[in-house]
Image: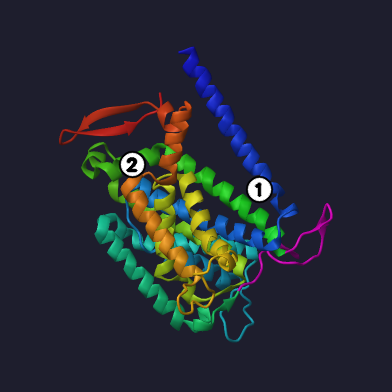
Amino acid sequence: MFSTLRTRSRASWIRLGSVTLALVLMIAAPFFAESKWLFLGILCMGMAIGAIGLTVLVGTAGQLSLAHGFFVAVGAYGYAFLAGSPEDPQLWGLGWPPLLAATGGVVLAALAGLLFSPVAARLRGLYLGLASLALVFIGEHILATARPLTGGPNGREIDPLAIAEFQLSGNDPDFSVFGVPFGMNERLWFVALFGIIVAIVVASRIVTGRSGRALQLLRDNTAAAAAMGVDVQRQKAEAFVFSSAFAGAAGVFLALSYQFIVPESFGLTMSINFLAMIIIGGMGSIGGAVAGAVIVTALPTLITLSSVALPFVSQTGGAGTITPGLLSQIIFGAAVIAILILEPGGLAGITRRLVRRIGFPTPAETVPIHSRTIGDGSPTRIKEKI
């Protein structure tokens, strides 16, 4: 018994040390990393926020969604519309303060999820996936034709995030920290770091709390969940709204990062990439969603930088070669197939196996799991903290 307690205590200290070290490195990154790597890191953190929302929806609640790119677009264009200048004769804008506009973009994405939630509450599995897919095509049409709102195919410029006259995603005013000039990427890095920390904390508390246990039971056995008093339709709707809000936050970060958005960036490919993130990382795992987002977002850039050493990769994709984007898609597809066949738990499952082999208990092993017979007599595994 004492040996087990010591092992768990040691594992807790190791996890705490690892998180602290990672946080210190993330805080120090703007002081030694080049601007292009900071930009890539910002994109990874922004996409990770969206992936966290999707892994809660698909992995924890068991609701398939192919419309994540649509809600990301709502967040991005919502911020552009709310923060845009009302004096522009060609594009609509309300001229809200940027921080309020960023919050408004997240709220608009959540409201879009709320409008779709009645459909999500009544469908599941493939039917829900097909219904959500319709949102992507509707969104593509709206983004391409609503020129005063979106700029049409030519896109729309994004106003920087700012507090009063101080830009958090721009270069005004100029200043340095320890001799390091803090431009757009250095400032936005810390905003994105704060955003991903908040997203991880909020999602972790939801997944490990009462709502998370209700969503897991709903995923495993809808009839059993209803028999235990879970409001099935409400829980499904709340999960979709939660996921949509996280997607909207990702859209705001992407808009701030690129400073210019076009409709073609928010198509079906983006939704599929989000699904690839949570499958590679491990569905239902928040840490896995972050890792999957980093891999899927960073891999095309890494392939592009190493294309000189790869004779079959070319920026133009000429005869006998393929583009870095196509190669990355092939790798993603192969990785998804391999994970589904060999390790359905993804990177999170592989990590748990390695940790158990070392001899440390995983967080899931420290929570007692009881089997109960509910409703039709089928055993349902319910996690309860004692």
Q: Quadrant of residue 132?
A: bottom left
Span shown in magenta: 158-183
- Label 1 packing within 10 angstroms: few (<14), some (14-19), many (20+): some
In-image side of 138 versus 372 (left or right): right
Q: Which residue lies at the image location 64% right of the left edge and 43% below the top edge? A: 23
Q: Position of residue 213 (x, y in %)?
A: 36, 38
In which image quadrant can residue 128 be found? bottom left
The amino acid at mark 1 is Met
Label 1 or label 2, whichever comes before in sequence order: 1
Of the pair 199 and 358, the residue shown nearer to us:
358
Mark 2 surroundings within 10 Å by alpha-carbon count, few (fewer than 14), some (14 through 19), many (20 or more): many
**43 relative to 112 in the view: left or right:** right
Pick the front one: 38 or 174: 38
Residue shown at 66% from the left, 64% from the top: 161
In the image, residue 80 sits, relative to residue 201, either above or below, namely below
The reply to whether residue 242 is visible in this rendering is: no
Determine which quarter of the picture holds residue 66: bottom left
Q: Position of residue 46 (x, y in %)?
A: 55, 58
50 relative to 220, above or below: below
The N terminus lies in which quarter of the figure? top left
Marks 1 and 2 sit apart, C-alpha to C-alpha, by: 32 Å
Residue occupied by mark 1: 26
- Amino acid type shown at disc 2: Gln
Percent x, y for residue 201?
A: 53, 43
Foreground tag (1 vs 2): 1
Give the overall secondary structure of the magenta segment: loop
Which colouring convention does the figure follow?
A: rainbow
Rendered residue at 74%/53% (across/down): 32
From the image, tell me which residue sits under label 2.
216
Please state, as top left, top right, bottom left or bottom right, where the C terminus lies in the image.
top left
In what element is the residue under mark 2?
Answer: helix
Q: Quick one: SS at disc 1?
A: helix
